[in-house]
Amino acid sequence: MSKANEQKYFERLNISVATISKIKSLIKTNIINTMKSWEQGRDIEKQAFHIIGPAGVGKTQICSQIANELSEILKVKFETKIIKSPVLSRDDFIIPFPIIDNGKTSFKMLYSDFVPKDPNSFGLFVIDECNRGDHSLQQLLWQVQNENKLHLMDFPKGWFVVALDNPDDQEYSVDTIEDAAGLRRMLHIYTEVSVEDFLKYGISANFHPYIIEFIQTHPNYLYDYEVQKLGSVYANPASYERASNILWNYELNGGVKENLDDIEILLSGLLNIHKTRLLVDFIKEKKGINPKDIFYDYDKKVRNKILQMVEEKDNASLGDIMVSFSTFLVTSKPQVKEDELKNIIKFLTDVPVDTASIFVLQIDGCDRTSDEFKYYTKLQIDLMKDKNYTEKFYNILIETRKKDTSK
């Protein structure tokens, strides 16, 4: 295998990587800024976006969200047309139709309903899995992406193009056209799986609590990369959303715990057998340390288990629990009262400082303008008022960092 093929797709293209929520924000802001520029007399060119990322990460979902939110912000109806390249052909978009005039035959192009035609309309034209369409369709759609037109017909000015693709890695069967013109004219950006994005979306969309708590407790279960490479059914954000729907259906019709045998069969077709059994065990017994128990009831439910892990020097498990707890805080943003503050302090001072440092490092991963950053910053300020926290954790962490940087 050549060195080029060993590189990740985003490395070969030399492009940025961002979370799906960040990409959503960037595209929405770009469209708003473009339309405002038009209103102010600056007729700038529209930007076509190319989002690349693993299947099931939420690329298609954010396009519908962008259109809905733009409708609210701009006070115009923003439509969404999503076309699936693998199941379409060039003739599904455009076909020459013979016309006889004065005995002479000419051809008029007929455009399908996929193509936006109303000059006063607004929307997103989403090309899903363009690199899995046949070659002639890809060439046609590249004109849409690069020129905002189809054959000789321009798209309405208020329509913006977003292309979605899986990466050209070994897990995916794709047929990618990469030429200098295409790379030049589109804005390419790569997205990876974000547990925080999934949980924020899941909480806002009212996912079943078992799904939310399962991923908060086991963030590394969200996307099953290794199983995906084997060509098996694999857990991913989209499949967990469908699993949530199944759980809610049983919740309202007979109960979840009362129907776990049937649920296990159904969910194994979405998440695979192994991940489903882990989820079912979690529902039955709530295996593992739930971050909610650390937050609300540390002494009674959790502390003895944590101290045992510390004694056994099980740093891997402690690290996973710290990630789980930090993820719970930034996604749920629970109200922190005096008792909860004491629980957090006990937890952080019970575990080794290098493991507990994950808690502080969580702030570095937050957007400085986000609600998550404001929540974490306020929590940090409240924690710093406690002598135990500063002496047994924070000051030790600072001294450790100083030693590491001085080496």
Image (spheres, grey):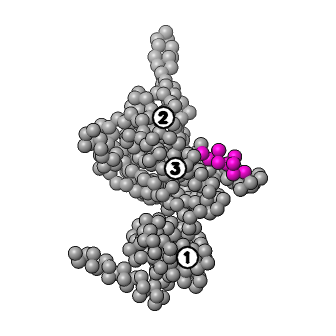
Of pointers 1 and 3, the one earlier in the residue sequence = 3
Q: Mark 3 points at which residue?
A: 236
Of pointers 1 and 2, the one earlier in the residue sequence = 2
Of pointers 2 and 3, the one earlier in the residue sequence = 2
Q: Name the residue under label 1.
A: 304
As rendered, which of 184 and 41 lies closer to the eye? 184
Residue 351, quarter of the rendered image: bottom left
Q: Mark 2 points at which residue?
A: 85
* Label of residue 103 in the image: none
Circles 1 and 2: CB atoms closer than 8 Å:
no
**Left or right of 247, for residue 7:** left
Q: Which residue lies furthest to the left in this view?
A: 407
User: Residues in magenta?
Assistant: 259-268
Give coordinates of residue 65: x percent, y percent: 55, 53
The residue depicted at 69 percent of the width and 48 percent of the height is 261
Callout in the foreground (1, 2): 1
As rendered, which of 87 and 329 lies closer to the eye? 329
Which quarter of the figure is the N terminus placed in? top left
**Left or right of 205, for residue 402:** left
Question: How many discs mark residues in the rendered view?
Answer: 3
The residue depicted at 37 percent of the width and 55 percent of the height is 17
Instruction: Give the vertical position of 321 relative to 397 (above or below).
Output: above
Q: How crowded is mark 1: few (under 14 residues within 10 Å), some or many (20 or more)?
A: few
Give coordinates of residue 352: x percent, y percent: 41, 76
Magenta highlight: main SS: helix
Which quarter of the figure is the C terminus placed in? bottom left
Instruction: Give the vertical position of 387 relative to 44 (above or below).
Output: below
* Residue type at tag 3: Asn
CA separation, marks 1 and 2? 55 Å
Q: How crowded is mark 3: few (under 14 residues within 10 Å), some or many (20 or more)?
A: many
